[in-house]
Image (cartoon, helix red, strand yellow):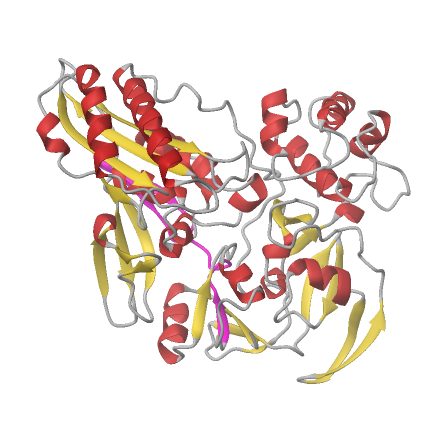
Amino acid sequence: VPRHLLPADLDAALELLAADPDAVPIAGGTDLWLELERGARTGVSALVDLSAIPGLNGISVAGDEIRLGPLVTHNDVVASPEVIAGALPLAQASLEVGSAQLRNRATVVGNLITASPANDTISALLALDARLTVRSTGREREIRLRDFYTGFRTTALEPGELVTAITIPRLGGRSRGIFVKAGLRKAQAISVVHIAAVVDLDGEENLTGIRLALGSVLPTVQLVPGLEEFLGSPLADSVDAITAAAVDFAEPIDDLRATAEYRHQILAVMVRRALRALAADRQADHWPSNPPRLVTPAAATVTSGGTAGGTTGITAATRSIGPDDPITVEVNGSAVTAAGTTGRSLLEWLREQAHHRVTSVEAPGEVSTGSGDSLLGTKEGCAEGECGACTVLLDGVAVMSCLVPAARAAGSRVTTVEGVGERSGSGELNPLQESFVESFGVQCGFCTPGFIVAGTALLAENPDPDDGQIRLGLAGNLCRCTGYYPIIEAVHRAAGKLDGGTEVAR
């Protein structure tokens, strides 16, 4: 992609998309970036990066509704008391998306418009009867999510349109909801089947409303029709009949994750268990205490403008960065100016370009360079956001740098493994690094930089995590050597050394 555009506000982004039909919007980019890398998306003239636009990641409550901005990430949802209390299925679904690092970039809107039947939040928001606000330069309209999907991976979005808000009726009174997912592993699993159910009950526990959404079962996520026949009946007595209706409706897909027959069988089990949990008012039983997000106290909101390089934008509200335009990034506390961002991930830029430092700019595209320190600690393991070896802190937030466009880091602060801890630059190991050595949490060492950065963020966020929080916080980091137990021990050991919160992340 030859150009990366950073609009300062939503109006500027919409104007860019209206002016160039080959420009593509990007926010978290965790799916789009892989499509571009693999050649599945071609003919893209520019990326219109929404992720640094301020004010679009808010979650608000107005009356009986919750409103999510277009840049709300899955971890924003996980951390929202309003969503947990008023839209629990969405919080449960968001926690199932990828890993903490991925959830820090991936947006709920992005999960909806990607339109895969395996996308977890679609079933949750269908069951919650969500509505989408959609804008272009010429108009604004509202679409019920149940009317948004026109087929397999296709939506009702028109060229130049962006989803600018999600509106969710709050669960309250005697309304209850739950999301349940089956995958091939506990973390970073694409759904084999996912379901969401919302029920409304009267004072006698009789059904006054019910919506049941099935995902990874049909080519699109769909609501089970015809459940109105159960209204007026006790939920507890209707579980088996509703389950049978869901199974009868489903014509499961057959793919590499599961056969159609297996999906049919597991669907019945999942629906029955979900409805029983709702009948017993135990839908929140498995919600974890203080789930880690790997967001440090140093996390800051970045606004477009910053200290980044790049040429003057198409409008005054837009910066345009091309292949030869240098950007400035604060890396481990020092300003680094280097070019070569377009078409590269932040991981690639850190390893391959950041040491080619720009020393002066004679004219646009004409620069003088010098050599700086190489930044080779951040590793490429999978290049698709599933191993965690490339974890860095972007403005105090742990992310998979293989999925972040390098140009997005313009004007931001990046901390790599070379820069973590209060002892960085001193030649000494910080407490977490010491603990990895003492607990034998390092063997081949290739995954270790990612664990150190993720662990640093975890301890900065929660100085005394329990086993469950450590496992959840580090679920995005894979290790083929240690069996993980020494790593968990190392984090506990480091927590003891830090004495309840000594700063370990800048």
Residue 148 in the figure: left or right of residue 485: left
Please identify the quarter of the rendering in which residue 411 is found: bottom right
Please identify the quarter of the rendering in which residue 134 is found: bottom left
Residue 355 coordinates in the image, percent (x, y)? 80, 65
6, 435: nearer the viewer: 435
From this view, report whether residue 48 is shown above or below residue 88.
below
Q: Which residues are magenta?
A: 46-70
From this view, report whether residue 24 is shown above or below residue 178.
below
Quadrant where the C terminus sits is top right
Residue 306 coordinates in the image, percent (x, y)? 59, 63
378, 235: nearer the viewer: 235
Q: Is residue 82 visible?
A: no
User: Is 104 colored magenta in this rendering?
Assistant: no
483, 422: nearer the viewer: 483
Residue 81 coordinates in the image, percent (x, y)? 40, 30
Residue 172 coordinates in the image, percent (x, y)? 24, 27
Quadrant where the N terminus sits is bottom right
From this view, report whether residue 446 is shown above or below residue 11.
above
Which residue occupies 74% across, 38% down?
452
Which residue occupies 66% across, 37% down?
457
From this view, report whether residue 170 is shown above or below residue 427.
above
Residue 246 in the figure: left or right of residue 342: left
Which residue occupies 75% across, 52% down?
333
